[in-house]
Amino acid sequence: MSVIFVVLPLALLLAAAAVIAFIWATRRGQFDDLDTAGLRMLHDDEDARSRRREPGTTPSDSRRAQRRPADS
């Protein structure tokens, strides 16, 4: 029974800390836009590929050029 005198205040402190952290995060704008970050990862790879290629080449052309050793 004496354990409850230790565990109950610790549980209340932990719950209060979680509520304070949640309020702090919402006031700082952490939950304003939850969708953009998840969607951005779908488009980043396409943008990086298009920047690496020279205009007028296909993706397979740029891969062949990268594998080919430089003429010396």
Image: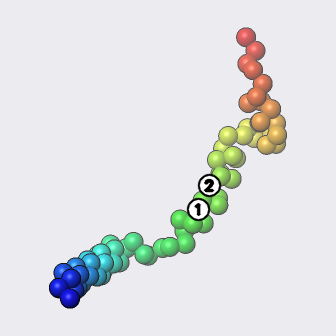
Circle on res. 40: 1
| Tag 2 and tag 1, C-beta contact below 8 Å | yes
The C terminus lies in quadrant? top right
Which amino acid type corresponds to the residue marked 1 in the rendered image?
Answer: Arg
In-front residue for pair 37/18: 18
- Residue at disc 2, secondary structure: helix
Residue 71: image quadrant is top right
In the rendered image, the residue lying farthest to the top is 72
Circle on res. 24: none
Residue drawn at x 80%, y 32% is 64
Residue drawn at x 48%, y 73% is 33
Residue 56 in view here: no
On screen, residue 26 versus residue 40, left or right, reads left
- Number of numbered labels in the structure image: 2
In-front residue for pair 14/30: 14
Percent position of residue 32, x then y: 44, 76
Residue 24: image quadrant is bottom left
In-front residue for pair 18/4: 4
Percent position of residue 62, x then y: 77, 36
Which amino acid type corresponds to the residue marked 2 in the rendered image?
Answer: Asp
* Label 1 crowd bin: few (<14), some (14–19), many (20+), radius 10 Å: few
- Residue at disc 1, secondary structure: helix
* Label 2 crowd bin: few (<14), some (14–19), many (20+), radius 10 Å: few
Percent position of residue 39, x then y: 60, 66
In the rendered image, the residue lying farthest to the front is 1
Task: Report which residue position mark 2 lands on.
Answer: 44
Residue drawn at x 34%, y 74% is 25
Residue 18 in view here: yes
The N terminus lies in quadrant? bottom left
Distance between the alpha carbons at the discs numbered 2 and 1: 6 Å
On screen, residue 61 versus residue 37, left or right, reads right
